[in-house]
Image (spheres, rainbow, N blue to C red):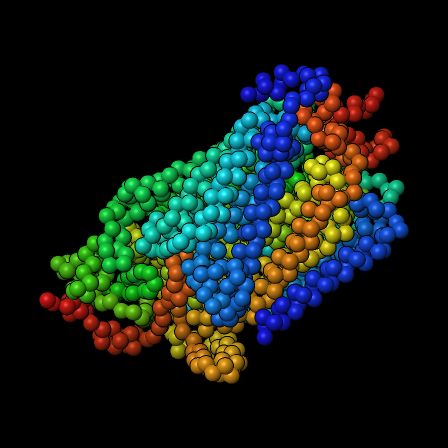
Amino acid sequence: MSAHVDTHTHEDDHGHHHKETFVTKYIFSQDHKMIAKQYLITGIIMGIVGILMSLLMRMQIAWPEKPNVIFEALLGKWAPGGVMDADIYLALVTIHGTIMVFFVLTAGLSGTFSNLLIPLQIGARDMASGFLNMISYWLFFLSSVIMIISLFVEAGPAAAGWTIYPPLSALPLAQGGSGAGMTLWLVSMAIFIASSLLGSLNYIVTVLNLRTKGMSMTRLPLTIWAFFITAVIGVVSFPVLLSAALLLIMDRSFGTSFFLSDIFIQGEVLHYQGGSPVLFEHLFWFLGHPEVYIVLLPALGITSEVIATNARKPIFGYRAMVASIIAIAFLSTIVWGHHMFISGMNPFLGSVFTFTTLLIAIPSAVKAFNYITTLWKGNLQLNPAMLFSIGLVSTFITGGLTGIILGDSALDINVHDTYFVVAHFHLVMGISALYGLFAGVYHWFPKMFGRMLNKNLGYIHFWVTAVCAYGVFFPMHFIGMAGLPRRYYTNSNFPLFDDTQNVQILITIFALVAGLVQLVFLYNFIHSMFYGKKTEQNPWRSNTLEWTAPVEHMHGNWPGEIPHVHRWAYDYSKPGHDEDFVPQNIPLKDGEEELQH
Amino acid sequence: MTGLLTILILFGITIAIWQMVKIFDLAQANRDTSQIANDNDNSVNGYLMLAFLGFIYLITIISFALWGDLPLVSNSASEHGPEIDRLMIISMVVIFIVQTITQFLLHYFAFKYKGEKGRKALFYADNDKLEFIWTIIPVIVLAGLIMYGLFTWNDIMNVNEDEDPLVVELYAQQFNWKARYAGEDNVLGKANVRLIDLDKANILGLDESDPNAQDDIITTELHLPVGRPVLFKMRSQDVLHSAYMPHFRAQMNCVPGMITQFAFTPTVTTEEMRLNPDIYEKVRNINKIRNENSKKLQANGEEPLDRYEFDYLLLCNKICGKSHYNMQMKIIVETEEEYNEWINEQKQFKNSLVQN
């Protein structure tokens, strides 16, 4: 596969362009930069759907009895007279989770930036296989379309939670959404997994084989390390979800009993015997937990790069950062059981998973401390991307710390599946990864579109979002500790929780404002794409190779020879240099030593 | 009214953002149009970082002050409850300290080292000693928490059969709970959903020929004698449910096709809990809220809300379908005598069957 790109010599690439039509350039493009843009824009569109769903849920929770014209307008038959149906509430819960986790934060984040940055930062002309890369995007697009179509199914979209635990997800008798809606969900996810695997394989091969001369693994920018390890986790864990989905399809459609046994529903005994839903939980979380890091690691990689560049300082503890990425990746595959402490599995297993889970706090803590030390005595350029990166570290700490409670099996008993969990994971993986996505967009927008995003709109976007993110999720911990279960359509049947309702209203108001301010970003994004200020070649005065490529996109990325690499990516403010940055392609001066890292 | 108010607030915010953009644009009309942060941006955002640190602290304080008493961190009603609560408080203190310090360092550094033209950052890439320190400190703290957690977990999950626990089955179905007491022999009769016979009112699928099943008692309310260990055996007939009893710090999933279990000893009767000053205050507050809501309802010609009285609850805490949000059962903890009196009034299984 890699031979295809290698055989292009430079002259060959740039002397005579292949004939490009509109279709091969903008639609079925095999160019990694175009594919990155396609991923980003698809991700943003899915993000709008996902966020909108969360706002509908928030409004329902805050004002459950009030008919709402917005519900009637958006949900149609599912909100007769403006009163939301309980089934569609669960469907919103389900599809919001699915879209945000997989379509926005996996494909939208990792797909965009792995594609954009891997070839550009390692000094390659393109991905190892441009064709597979194109297929990967179009499979993702197809799965997005199917997921959206599933919203319009007669009996309702999938509504068993994004974890689709059987038997609820397996039996149309148990829930309307478990009929055609669930079938489409499974088909969409199966295609998504295929897309993700093609992408991941491509990233791994590209990083291993196509690095330019001098780009040793220890000189890789941390972004690339993060994308690389993320791809490895994806290849290890996504196939397991695929197998779970296939077995579930068998149970649903072909009468097998992998996950089902002894069921009596709506007056009849079903034939299933011998299966176990707990088995599904194991298979699901074997992907489900690594998925958290598939979402998070690219965001942390982007943050490392953005913080070092804007602090004008080397990232502190490069070796420790790489080691902690690898440690997190390894540990992430042996902690899945902490989602299942009270699933009915053997309590001894609970002890083991408590142990491994709390271990993962150590590399995470190292990363947080290293970010903070990188800021120390820096010369911080507080660009919007930098603000989002600092914001990420902040929410990563706040959200990560409560993991100490949830990862502890004894404490999990009482907060499992309450709002405490919702607050925890939204902060640590939702908001953090979203900030990583935004940081990446603000930082590399010039690379993608040749124009700059408006910084003042960026500042407004960040500060309002940052305040609202805490406003939404910080108080949420407390209603969770009061014992309020998540995924309740309304809490009005429990007078016990009446004193949490004012908190719910406050949270919803913060959420609505946060949703609204994303429109500022959307406007900035679309407007700047066409009318933004034209960028210079290296606007952030960064060291990495992508900024040595010309602003105008071209096949093969660099005219002439690919730059060679002579140093690591973090020679910022190095003594002995006039400028406060030394790009990786600048040879060492006489007598200059490369840092032993 | 709240809806209208929200729309007004949102509208106000929209206008505010629009105006802010205009002000930013006007202020910069005559200056550089570069979209890269300059010293002025660094300064403004540096101070905002400091303000944001204040905001994080503020929201922490407000949350604890206003809603810190929502959690039932004290007043658990089971024997193992205080242990969980103690571990929870220790963990919270650790988290609180780490959060306060790290957020301070992060935001303070962002303010202190905000960029200025001409200044050069310190080239500082590594310090093995420092990194060792902040690897080893979490290791030690976590080791402590893990040990404590594991001991607590083992204590809770290890069921001691010698203590002669009262055996009760919790039976979940879309969307209600049933309880099955083991009766005089304290042994639950065999059961399987395949044996359910609605015509004979054998709703839980008990084996009618099993002698142990004859004295079983099926109820829709859960009564527990105070001070006696209870061993719950959970079953579900259709989908996953989770038996969540927050006041007792107890939760376990109900899984179709298998029997799961959880044991605890209730220590406070419902009556005593109602008189507990914290709970009394909480109930009073809730009733105040309900009174206000009732007034609004009555103004619209609707029925007012019932007065709330404290009761322990069993809630479903695993998404189980349309009415998941209203799958609950009342739990009453009472003295041994009251319990015996109540249980003797209930019908035994053999007498509850409808004979054709």
Residue that appears at 23% across and 56% down:
A268
Quarter of the view holding residue A570: top right
Horizontal relation, residue A151 to residue A167: left or right: right
Could you tell me how many numbered marks the image carries?
A: 0
In what quadrant of the picture does the C terminus of chain A appear? top right
Instruction: Looking at the picture, tell me which residue is in the foreground, B288 or A59.
Output: A59
Quarter of the view holding residue A320: top right
* Image coords of residue A441 (percent x, y): 68, 43
Is residue A349 placed above or below B217 in the rendered structure? above
Whether residue B155 can be seen here: no
Instruction: Looking at the picture, tell me which residue is in the foreground, B216 or B55.
Output: B55
* Image coords of residue A116 (percent x, y): 64, 34
Name of the residue lying farthest toward the front: A21
Name of the residue lying farthest toward the left: B356
Is residue A368 placed above or below A195 in the rendered structure? below
Is residue A360 placed above or below B174 in the rendered structure? above
* Image coords of residue B164 (percent x, y): 27, 62
* Image coords of residue B118 (percent x, y): 88, 41
Residue that appears at 46% across and 70% down:
A492
In what quadrant of the picture does the N terminus of chain A appear? top right
Is residue A342 placed above or below A485 in the rendered structure? above
Residue that appears at 33% across and 65% down:
B176
